[in-house]
Image (cartoon, rainbow, N blue to C red):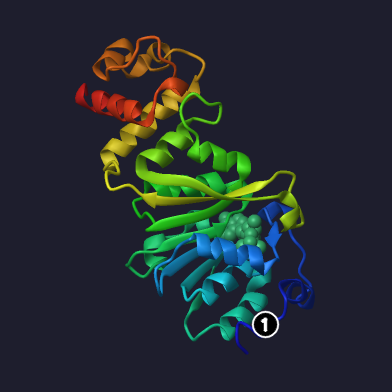
Amino acid sequence: MTLEALPPLRDALAAHGLMAKKAFGQHFLLDLNITRKIARLAELPDGAMVIEVGPGPGGLTRALLEAGARVVAVEKDERFRPLLEDLAAAAPQGALTLVFADALAADEAALAGGGPGHMVSNLPYNVGTALLIKWLTGPWTPASMTLMFQKEVAQRVVAPPDTSAYGRLAVIAQATSHAAMVMEVPARAFTPPPKVDSAVVRLTPRADRPEPARLDALQKLTAAAFGQRRKMLRASLKALGGEALIEAAGLDPQARAETVDVAGFLRLADAWRAQR
Ligand code: SAM
């Protein structure tokens, strides 16, 4: 058997008697044209090492394997084992490694075999943001990420200041990465369709990515600032230094969290570390 000879995904699911389970955030992409497009958008180098979270029926996995990637697929739902083993058998020898585990607890450095790894996934909605924060803040961070989220989360990743979507996630994502929304996918493209549309975000690490202690400070500052996003920073950051901190960062004393850009938050983080 080869990848080309595999049955359509719908038939593979039916053959294994599999139905989507809501508790696992399962909404499947059964149209290989869409999964191939996502694999292309990942812009993977030849023979790339890819970690995929939640392969489910394996539509995106197939596309990644067709593109010549080596894939480690981490799936929590054991029911997919036989179907994914068929896929591993059809793929070039050793190209697909299956790991049945919770991705939230996964050791990505070990999964990537000690080298760089790219993250490409149609993420389960219920843990998508938690996984993104884990990969953005490290210690292990991917060489690139091409990730499907519900559209509202994708918008929160790429949002500029002064918009309602701008918040902690935007600041942490954009301080560490170049982030762009590269594809929108309507709810009807999934089986079963979720209630909302989805979008693919691509993130690549910034050369000037903050080192761990600076990133920790940024996380602390953004948590306090956006915890009370309607308040002026001098109130929301009172416990962390309030007005003195805002002055040291060269910000307007009237500023509110959603008006401060990523560079402004980095200056706040630096000022907070300097005063300790
Ligand atoms: N990649 C498939 C596709 O595009 O058709 C499935 C995507 S579906 C949105 C999310 C997948 O993640 C499901 O297969 C689900 O079982 C799996 N999943 C959910 N929570 C997980 C977790 N914590 N760790 C690993 N996989 C998980």
Quarter of the N terminus within the rendering: bottom right
Dot 1 amino acid type: Leu
Q: Position of residue 127 (x, y in %)?
A: 57, 48
| SS at circle 1 | loop
Residue 44: image quadrant is: bottom left
Q: Tell me the quadrant of ligand 1.
A: bottom right
* Residue at the spot of label 1: 6
The answer to whether residue 98 is seen in the rendering is no
Camera sees residue 65:
yes
Q: Residue at x 39, y 45 (%)?
A: 178
Q: Seen in the image, is 207 located left or right of residue 159?
A: left
**Label 1 CB less than 8 angstroms from ligand 1:** no
Residue 241 occupies which quadrant of the picture? Answer: top left
Q: Is residue 153 above or below residue 22?
A: above
Residue 154, above or below 73: above
Q: Position of residue 219 (x, y in %)?
A: 38, 34
Furthest-bottom residue in view?
A: 1
Q: Callout 1 environment at 10 Å: few (<14), some (14 to 19), or many (20+)?
A: some
Residue in the picture at 30% in, 44% down: 209
Q: Residue at x 56, y 26 (%)?
A: 164
Residue 45 occupies which quadrant of the picture? bottom left
Total labels: the figure holds 1
Report the residue at 47% width, 31% height from top.
160
Residue 90 locus on image (x, y percent): 59, 85
User: As rendered, which of 41 and 105 lies closer to the eye?
Assistant: 41
Residue 213 image point, x, y percent: 27, 38
